[in-house]
Image (cartoon, grey):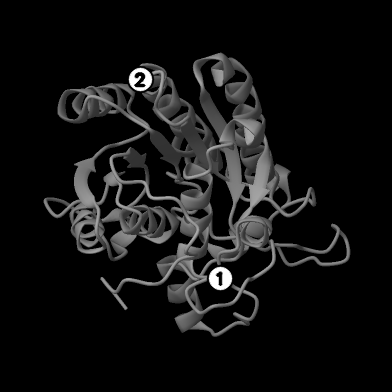
Amino acid sequence: MQGAKQPIAKHLKTLTGRVAVVTGASRGAGRAIALVLAEAGATVYVTGRSASAGQTTEGLPGTVENAAEEVTQRGGKGIAARVDHTNEQDVAAFFERVKRESGRLDLLVNNVWGGYEQYDGPDFDLPFWEQPTEKRWQGMYVAGLRAHFLSSRFAAPLLIARKADAPPGLIVNTVGWAYGEYLRNLYYDVAKSAIIRMSFGMGLELKKHHVAAVALAPGFMRTERVMAEHAKGPFDLSGTESPEYGGRAVAALAGDPRIMERSGKLFTSGDLAREYGFTDVDGKQPEGFRIPPYGEDEAPQSTGT
């Protein structure tokens, strides 16, 4: 239910006083992550291109203002920011705003992703040599991989500048992953793999600054986009998870005082649920997303990330 507070694992650490940025948070996984961080008491900047003063992306519901209001209702402090994460000047100006207003940054969640925009069904399933190159490149590499990199690039100085006695800083990059199996679309598979490798490199370079970087793979989520497709022609939702399941994974990582030991690594929401002891909003613990080896299953599947 919108605005309703859901119980999270009792052992999750409080994030009161922490400042977080969640990109691509007007809806879907980003919005859900922001809401869970709010329940732990964080101040959360929610970013995206969908704002009340303009059009929402692809006409989908949700704006950064809506999400920020919900963050505040959940117990945190929500701050809306319209940001085009493909525009370097936009991103730089936004993090200058965070510095000016909050004076610090403890957590960056890179969730922005343009790879599903203009999704047109069978077009996504074509072999790579028949794919529309420009559309895929712009959506998955410019509005995906590069967007993650840009936010990290401008967030890093703020994360590094935190007080020496503060808890470790953290960058979480959300990705699609299925335990190393091919994700059925070459553009998608390579873009997500690059983000995972980027997390590894960031972890190495940030280690001496007491800042961790990890990649997080949610499962098949019941996002607004997925549910809109489901309404057109129902498909099996068994084994799916709410977007807040991934949010609980982020909150658990952010509250882990030993997070530096996990830096540079890749995790699934399902595996972290078992390690940290949290559940989804319905009390279940969906396992990490899996697909059969390529060739046994010809229908491409998406995690919704």
How many numbered marks have been drawn onto this rendered protein structure? 2
Looking at the image, which residue is at 41% across and 36% down?
108
Q: Residues within 10 Å of mark 1 (few under 14, many from 20)?
A: many
Task: Provide residue 86's location: percent of width, then percent of height.
Answer: 37, 32
Looking at the image, which residue is at 53% across and 38% down?
257
Looking at the image, which residue is at 50% across and 47% down?
115
Amino acid bearing label 1: Glu
Task: Provide residue 105's location: percent of width, then percent of height.
Answer: 33, 30
Determine the secondary structure under disc 1.
Answer: loop
Tell me the residue that label 2 is attached to. 163
How far apart, in angstroms, are the residues tagged by discs 2 and 1? 37 Å
Instruction: Indicate which disc, 2 or 1, sits on the residue closer to the N terminus.
Output: 2
Asked if residue 224 can be seen in this view, the reply is yes
Which is more foreground, mark 2 or mark 1? 2
Task: Provide residue 69's location: percent of width, then percent of height.
Answer: 18, 58
Residue 235, image quadrant: bottom right
Amino acid bearing label 2: Lys
Looking at the image, which residue is at 66% across and 47% down?
267
